[in-house]
Image (cartoon, rainbow, N blue to C red):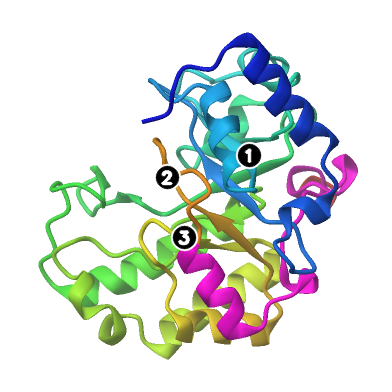
Amino acid sequence: MTRHLTRRDFARVTASLAAAPAAAFSRGRDFPLVDYHVHVEREMTIEKALKIAAERRVKIGVAEHGGCAEEMRDDAGLRRYIERLSPYPVYKGMQAEGLDWARCFSKEAISELDFVLSDALTFPEKDGRRVRLWTQEAKIGDKQDFMERYVDFNVRVIATEPIDIFANPTFLPEAIVGEYDTLWTAGRMKRVIDAAVEHEVAIEINALYRIPSLAFLRTAKDAGVKFSFGSNTHGDGIGKLDYCLEMAKTLGLSSKHMFSPASRESKPVMRRAAG
């Protein structure tokens, strides 16, 4: 259990992280080790998260949920969040919720973030329900029909949302996850990968669900996709990136393959608006 941080502890941890060069987080690689999928909420405070990150020699990106139906739903809320994180040596991000999230914020406010990530796990069913695929709500009838619609939705998220990172890629509900290699055919993988390449969206290597598969990642690397690492944690799993590191070693990933936050004028929300 993480002990309570004293003010002195926190000051020391924050100062050391802020002063550390990128090499301090690289663990011998030519790119810094960053966990871009960290949630700071409930008992996991930013101070606790930073202490865990320092112990694991990982920099973190905090991803607050944002969208038209979320607590952070407009420019004022987004800028309060950015201001709240500004004293800390973290990347400031948002996990975008809902396909319409971008209309609730100005592109200028979104561009103040270091990154935006989104996923396809809240899935629109034929009857209009939005089904959370990671819960027991997900009932799969015709597997092939589900997969075709699901891949369509993955591509839609990547193509229409001004995001930096596509998170939880190739996730499958519990009822069919055992058939991952069969259901995620080469053709289906290619559709998602092609969308990521076309729209310059990085693919997350997700440590929590141990996805995507090596086959997907190898094809994505060959196609020129950039990658990010994410623990997707709401607790003390921050910086536990074993699967990410395993895949990086197997694939021979280097700095040229890794996502890093773009300059403000080059953020997806600005780039796509200009296009």
Above/below status of 198 relative to 64: below
Report whether residue 230 is seen: yes
Expressed as whole percent of the image width and height from the top left, the position of residue 136 reads 13, 48
Three-letter amino acid code at the position of disc 2: Gly
Three-letter amino acid code at the position of disc 3: Asn
As drawn, is 148 to the left or to the right of 77?
left
Q: Secondary structure at mark 3?
A: strand
**The C terminus - image quarter:** bottom right
Asked if the residue at tag 2 contacts the one at tag 1, i.e. Cβ–Cβ closer than 8 Å, the answer is: no
What distance separates the C-alpha of mark 1 from that of mark 3? Answer: 20 Å
What distance separates the C-alpha of mark 3 from that of mark 2? Answer: 12 Å
Q: Secondary structure at mark 2?
A: loop
Q: Which residue is mark 2?
A: 237
The boundaries of the magenta stretch are: 242-271
Q: Which residue is mark 3?
A: 206
Q: Which residue is mark 1?
A: 54
Three-letter amino acid code at the position of disc 1: Ala
Expressed as whole percent of the image width and height from the top left, the position of residue 58 reads 64, 48
Q: Residues within 10 Å of mark 2 (few under 14, many from 20)?
A: some
